[in-house]
Amino acid sequence: MEILRQFRWQDILDIILVSIILYRLLLIIKGTKAAQMLIGLGVLLLASLLSSYLELYTMDWMIQSFWAQIVIALIVLFQPEIRRALAQMGETPFLQTFTSAEELKSLEEIVKATVSLANRKIGALIVIERDTSLKDFVEVGTPLDAKVSREILMSIFHPTSPIHDGAVVIKGNRIIAAGCFLPITLSSEVSKTLGTRHRAGLGLTEETDAVALIVSEETGGISMAIGGKLETHLDMGTLRDILTDLFTAQKKRRR
């Protein structure tokens, strides 16, 4: 009871604010390499405690020396996540102007374009932004501001188009950039039979929560990369269902 009497309303506010900040940070790093790095830091902390308890002096000295430089190490390791977090602080997610019907129509146009490209065996890489901003990747591409449509996507990826080799980035119901270059995955688990588009889609989704649709120009197969994982051999119905589920769930979380 004595503790409760000493509890101030400022303490409650402090706890709530810290909880919100930690929650947002976890959302930002969810599904990225930063999450794996945090696990590594947790293992290092456990090793530090064990080495101190077991009196392993050399090991303890090495770990303590590392902790002395931990702030600089964290900035270097989490540079992309820190940059994205600062960028997101200036955004206003409450100002969403797209209706449910518009969002579903945009997804349907993306599905139709992807299937049409696959039927013609035209290679394509379509990236759909979710919570994590893709501004860094958009800046190196060709800026666009066009409503999502099957015809525009088909024209962008036509072999005669000067920007057909890069990725198209879609935000909401707008195509915001084309000809974008994405990071290539370095994972040794990726099949050597996969081409640059598949590796770029996987590389982006390892670092962000974006969805990447890949059309193979060799086979005409449709694949989807999300969370650093690749789903292959998708048909029109399956692709539509997955996208609808993903973005309907995202909209519910924002509310």
Image (tube, rainbow, N blue to C red):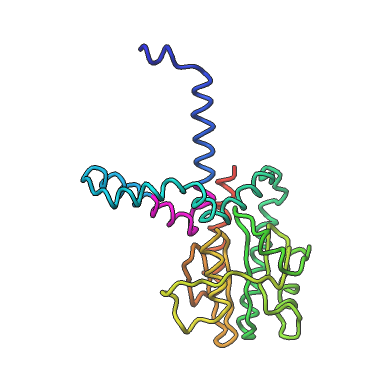
The residue depicted at 53 percent of the width and 37 percent of the height is 20
The residue depicted at 49 percent of the width and 72 percent of the height is 186
Q: Quadrant of the N terminus?
A: top left
Where residue 30 appears, as percent x and y from the top left, is: 49, 53
Q: Quadrant of the C terminus?
A: top right
Residue 34 within the segment the image draws in magenta:
yes
234 left or right, relative to 135: left
Question: Is residue 225 shown above or below 11?
Answer: below
Where residue 219 appears, as percent x and y from the top left, is: 54, 86
How many labels, in total? 0
Question: Is residue 245 shown above or below 202?
Answer: above
57 left or right, relative to 200: left
Towards the viewer: 42 or 205 = 42
Residue 136 within the segment the image draws in magenta:
no
Q: Residue furthest bottom?
A: 218
Where residue 55 appears, as percent x and y from the top left, is: 22, 45
Q: Which residues are magenta?
A: 26-41
The residue depicted at 49 percent of the width and 16 percent of the height is 8
